[in-house]
Image (spheres, coloured by chain):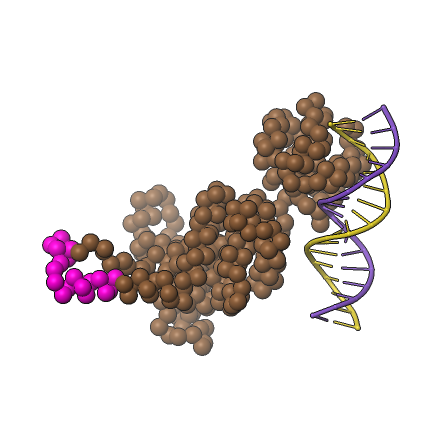
Chain colours: A brown, B yellow, C purple
Amino acid sequence: MSIVTIQMIVSNTSKGHESNHGPIITDNSSGEILCGSCGLVLIEKVEDMGNEQRIYDPEHYMSNSRTGAWSTLTIHDRGLSTVIDPKNKDASGNPIFGPMKNTMGRLRLWDSHSKSRSADRSMRSALQMLDTVKTKLDISDAVTERAAYFYRKAVLRKLTRGRNINGLILSALYAACRESNVPRTIQDIANSGNVNTKFLSRHYRLLARELDLNLESFAPSNFVSRLASISGLSEKTSRDALYILRQAKEKRITAGKNPVAFAAAALYLSALMNVEQKSQKKISDSCGISSVTIRNISMLLRKKLGINA
DNA sequence: CGGAGTAAAAGGCACTT
DNA sequence: AAGTGACTTTTACTCCG
């Protein structure tokens, strides 16, 4: 589909939207088309938003790409802003003197004011938070973009009014992780963002409800390698734990329960079988699940899967 | 101490009033 | 907005080897 076609569709469908919209942003995975200046979702479902040409190699791609740098959702103005150079030099590098110097100073001031005091000041702080947490938890750019997208959607729905920005941006990140199956718990994200878990889960529920997000919970197996390395368990043990979890999945006994708890219990059992026993308490301490829960779930696994350990 | 087990409290969820 | 009930998890405790 070409840009021209998209613009035709946009002009036909965007009733109530200003006709002078900015660059059009497309979201290939959800098939949405957003207005680049106000973020309004113009079209909800579009088929085949991929590049028109087939891509054979990077050079070929670059020579066929029609656009400049990717417009990114994770910079508050999508990387389109300009900054007035703080050095008092003109375009050819000669110093600026006298009244012109004062004018430049005033322009710079206005420029920075427009950035820090305008309506998107909160957007800046949100995206800054997103960036720090992304770095702390080693989350990919793709997932972070997705989080920024959710956040922008939340802003459009006016969910930010009177609400905590950190709560929403962190929920957006958690939602993006859930969607992309990047195993980060609410607790992980809450810790990195210096907010408490209850606060974050409250905001996440709000976001999920308002944006009609229906995200699957993580599979227990996602957490096995991480827990194994925290608790210092062997490769063999985590492989066996994965095997246990696969059986548990087949028996459909994991639904509605904390996936981390299942991962922990499976590791506990497989550690027993591999004679590198860790006490329930030790595992519980390192994974943030109570020893009672580990006990209960490992009992459940023993019963349902016939494990004698 | 490690583990099994339990009662009671707390938290979250869907649904109703 | 408060209440209800089914459900999961935690807290705090006892008992056993």
Residue A201 position, x and y percent, is: 61, 54
Identify the residue at horizontal 19%, vertical 65% (top origin). Answer: A103
Q: Which quarter shows the N terminus of chain A?
A: bottom left
Q: Which quarter shows the C terminus of chain A?
A: top right
Q: Nearer the viewer, residue A7 or A56?
A: A7
Task: Look at the image and tell me whether residue A266 can be seen.
Answer: no
Identify the residue at horizontal 42%, vertical 70% (top origin). Answer: A10
Q: Nearer the viewer, residue A10 or A229?
A: A229
Residue C11 position, x and y percent, is: 73, 44
Q: Nearer the viewer, residue A204 or A26?
A: A204
Residue A272 position, x and y percent, is: 72, 26
Q: Please tell me in which quadrant of the rendered image residue A85 appears.
A: bottom left
Task: Look at the image and tell me whether residue A103 can be seen.
Answer: yes
Residue A6 position, x and y percent, is: 40, 65
Q: Return the residue found at the far bottom.
A: A16
Q: What stretch of residues is rendered in magenta?
A: A89-108
Query: Height in image: A246 above or below A272?
Result: below
Q: Please tell me in which quadrant of the rendered image residue A231 appears.
A: top right
Q: Is residue A7 left or right of residue C5?
A: left
Q: Is residue C13 left or right of residue A147?
A: right
Identify the residue at horizontal 63%, vertical 38% (top origin). Answer: A287
Q: Is residue A99 left or right of residue A51?
A: left
Q: Is A126 covered by the magenta stretch?
A: no
Picture mark count: 0
Q: Is residue A31 left or right of residue A255?
A: left
Identify the residue at horizontal 50%, vertical 60% (top origin). Answer: A165
